[in-house]
Image (cartoon, rainbow, N blue to C red):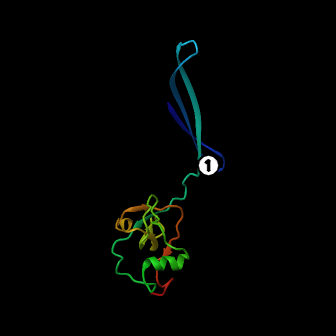
Amino acid sequence: MIKSQGMQGGKGLGVVVVQAEAFFVTSQYSSAQYFSVVVMACRFFIVWHFQPRSNVVRVRNINGTSDHDCRCGSWLKHWELFSKEKASLCVEESCTNEATVGAHVQKISSYDNDWYIIPLCKHHNNLRGEEIELYGSPTLVSANVSETCGG
């Protein structure tokens, strides 16, 4: 039997407690040659502490941006130069593919219409117009070349 419950810990930490009970049945012979069944019960608790996701960054991939160029050689190099980071993995939340492109995205919000560059794999870069949830808090680099590399 497995039961789980969630509760709020201190300082905004979430806590999940899982209680599991397992029963093991074995047979054995005693010295008097009587057959007996031994039932062993085991109960254990697993506790996970996690930080609730309150500052999730969601972006939308922008259609038709492949015509835009910058002086950095590629948009992925542009992101590396201005983020001062090395692109390794796609920043989509659940992806473990290598980041191969610098994708043009917009934050999903009503107040920020700027274009940004993030490292994505080809698969997630091809999700045109779809919402993408980002892993952690990746650096969003401005795609406005007049503010960065000068076009």
The C terminus lies in quadrant? bottom left
**Residue 96 can be seen in this image:** yes
Percent coordinates x, y for residue 121 in the rendering:
40, 68
Residue 132 sits in which quadrant? bottom left
Report the front residue among 15 and 122.
122
Above or below, 114 against 127 in this view is below
Quadrant in the picture for residue 70: bottom left
Residue 12 as seen in the image, left or right of residue 141: right
Percent across and percent down for residue 112 are 48, 69
Residue under the point 34% across and 67% down:
126
Q: Residue furthest right?
A: 10
Q: Is residue 127 above or below residue 48?
A: below
What residue would you read off at disc 1? Answer: 13
- Amino acid at dot 1: Leu
Q: How crowded is mark 1: few (under 14 residues within 10 Å), some or many (20 or more)?
A: few
- Secondary element type, mark 1: loop
Side of 137 relative to 100 (left or right): right
